[in-house]
Image (cartoon, coloured by chain):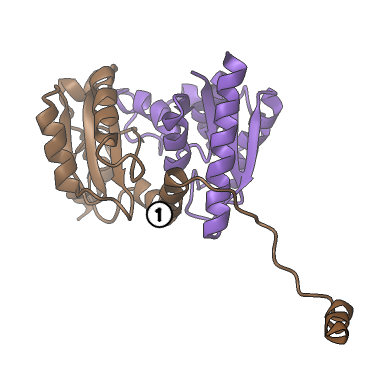
Amino acid sequence: MVKVAIFPPNSLILADLIERKGHESLALQKAVRKKVIDPEIDSPPMNISEEDPIKGLKYAAIEVPSGVRGRMSIIGPLIDEAEAAIIVDKAPFGFGCIGCARTNELSTFCMRKRGVPTLELVYPTNRDETIDMVNKINTFLDGLNNKEE
Amino acid sequence: MANNVSVNVCASTDLNSQDMDPDNITRMIILGPKAEVSESEVVNYIHLLGLPVTTKLTCYGAMVSGKEEDVLNVIKEVRKLDPYNLFSRDRGFPIGDPRRCRGHRYGPREGFHQMESEYKLLEDVSDALKNPKEVSLEKEKRMDLDELEQIFSEN
């Protein structure tokens, strides 16, 4: 079982396809779950604890807005944990972890920098492109199985 | 009104011990557009499994909450009902959490727009899973005029 980071980090399709192939998706919801039961935080991930922007310093400089650092404190550890990554680029507004374009850029940058096997795709706009995306993801995930063996 | 709105963002949570248990997880089961089972069938099936999980019927499918092992067992069994049209993903918030539940707030919950957007692709995704086939993404080109003239002249 390989831990696969995904972008957008809360994608249903990516998380589901990864799970179907027996791998573990590092979805944002898993990180949010840990925050939800933290009594310090009222409404994660909309607000954060004092510690979170400090943790985010590992991924973004002090000049970067605290919103980016706060988000990276949740997404960053998921990327660090990854053994593979799938990035779906050019997703329309409303799809994925929206709200902060700079966080999205930084997340994809961190994924590429990790040096783990990465599959980069473009968000599909029609039926053929969707089928092609699913084929590519499945082939990539099967390849991870072979590598593991 | 102001008091009601504050429920959305404040820690007025009424989570029980099960929800506060760090070993517990919540999963969403989402039916694709071509699903051959209904939401209520899925929920009834989960009840009949007799596992110690909490389940909730929703407009898109169902939510299941409980110990990780039990919930993953439920997902595994439920997928057998319609392997290519049932999708599942984690959910950060427990079932009925006032910070997210529509019963306690105005408008759709935050994750709804994401799901609505991805739902449009689910039909094609399930087709691709059911009948995998190679597709060509190359656009068809117009025939060159000289080539066309040559064909006509040959005939």
Colour in which chain A is drawn: purple
Q: Residues within 10 Å of mark 1 (few under 14, many from 20)?
A: some
- Could you tell me which residue is drawn at 25 percent across and 50 percent down? B36
Q: Amino acid at mark 1?
A: Glu
Colour in which chain B is drawn: brown
Residue B128 can be seen, yes or no: yes
Residue furthest toward the front? B155
- Could you tell me which residue is drawn at 44 percent across and 35 percent down? A15
Tell me if A35 is positioned left or right of A111 in this view: left
* Foreground residue among B23 and A147: A147
* Foreground residue among B98 and A49: B98
Image coords of residue B62 (percent x, y): 22, 41
Quadrant hosting residue B13? top left
Which quadrant: the C terminus of chain A?
top right
Q: Write down the residue under mark 1.
A: B123
Image coords of residue A62 (percent x, y): 65, 29
- Could you tell me which residue is drawn at 47 percent across and 31 percent down? A18
Q: Chain of mark 1?
A: B
- Could you tell me which residue is drawn at 76 percent across and 74 percent down? B142
Instruction: Classify A147 as above or below B47.
Output: above
Image coords of residue B19 (percent x, y): 21, 25
* Foreground residue among A80 and B10: A80
Tell me if B153 is positioned left or right of B76 in this view: right
Q: Secondary structure at mark 1?
A: helix
Instruction: Classify B118 as above or below B99.
Output: below
Residue furthest toward the top? A149
Residue B9 can be seen, yes or no: no
Image coords of residue B118 (percent x, y): 43, 51
Number of callouts in the render? 1
